[in-house]
Amino acid sequence: MNTPQPGPHPTPQDSPQPGPQPSLDELRRRALAAAAPRAADGDHAITCERLVRIFSTDGIEVQALQGLDLTVDRGDLIALVGASGSGKSTLLNILAGLDAPTAGTATVDGHDLLTMTAKQRLHYRRDTVGFIWQQTARNLLPFLTAAQNIALPLQLATGHRAARRHRSRVDELLETLGITDLAHRRPAQLSGGQQQRVAIAVALANDPAVLLADEPTGELDSDTAAAIFDAFRTVNRELATTIVIVTHDPMVAGEVRRTVAIRDGRTSTEVIRRTHTDEHGTETVHEREYVMLDRTGRVQLPAAFLAALGMRHRVAADLAADHIALHPDDHTP
Ligand SMILES: Nc1ncnc2c1ncn2[C@@H]1O[C@H](COP(=O)(O)OP(=O)(O)OP(=O)(O)O)[C@@H](O)[C@H]1O
């Protein structure tokens, strides 16, 4: 509780003496310093704080991201879910370096996405992130074979100098994704699921720190979608790549350890799944839903919980040894 403390009232002597006004440059420097991201956190592949993206079209402003907070640990595999228009693709495009945020902070593998120059953004897109689109045809060049598609980002990064190294990287990715026998086929000779496997290999070619996928199973039937998710899990396990997948598919969201829900341009709740193996080797999966806690201590409680207990404008908060209890407001004036 922030109770005002009794104390001496300020007197004219206590008031700051008028001094020279700071220059515009000085004010700008202070504002930038205050807004600067905190020191890069070694454990986090992705950190977003109070991320804002405003689109202006025909004089109308849409606030697609409204102060979104998200951290993703290195090596994590997470699903981002949310209703249409909640801001999932906007977030993914920012993380991919395809779009720039309006305000807030966003750091991926130590790269500050707000202050990047156009040239740095180009390098970032090529070396730090891999991206997979929903439209299978958009991920691959139709006139190249699967192996040539995978080799292309390597050649763009280092030229043709390291051809032998490129070949072994292509072979390694074909094998990890179980598509070695498809190496010489063009996209039109592959099924949708096979094309997405090749697309994952293309996105991984330059060994990115983070792999981003926007509805990668949206055009696939459920069996093929499950197989693609298996491929993501294999890549995550074997190559330790951090993976963020936007999806509408509740089945897909149920397949990852962490599912983060976005609502109205903010992260709202997340579900963490833990697998427990007992002494007989039997596995059980435990699920727990969490709400986000931001740096100022704000939490967004699930609407269904609030409605169930009739909680509206305020709640009574009590601190216990290991939890905080929230009770409906029973205060009668
Ligand atoms: N380029 C743009 N110009 C104007 N408004 C945009 C633009 N891109 C997105 N928006 C708006 O921002 C909001 C969030 O859109 P976004 O595409 O991120 O949602 P989404 O959660 O990915 O939706 P979906 O699941 O339907 O793809 C929407 O209101 C959308 O209309």
Image: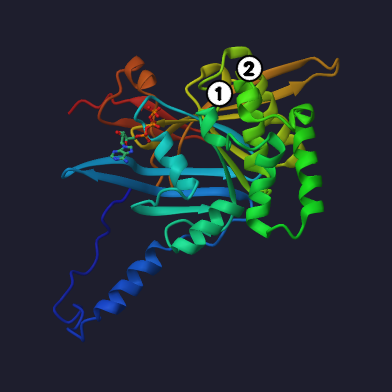
Circle 2 residue? 224
Nearest to the observer: residue 187 or residue 97: 187
- Secondary structure under tag 2 reads helix
Residue sitting at x 51%, y 19%? 249
Quadrant hosting ligand 1 = top left
Tell me whether circle 2 and circle 1 mark residues in contact (CB < 8 Å): yes
The image quadrant of residue 328 is top left
Locate residue 118, reporting x and y percent.
44, 61
- Secondary structure under tag 1 reads loop
Circle 1 residue? 217
Seen in the picture, residue 275 relative to 171 is either above or below; the reply is above
Residue sitting at x 60%, y 25%? 188
Mark 2 residue crowding within 10 angstroms, few (<14) / some (14–19) / many (20+): some
Asked whether, in this view, residue 161 is left or right of residue 129, the answer is right
Q: Farthest residue to the left: give it.
A: 12
Label 2 to label 1, Cα distance in Å? 8 Å
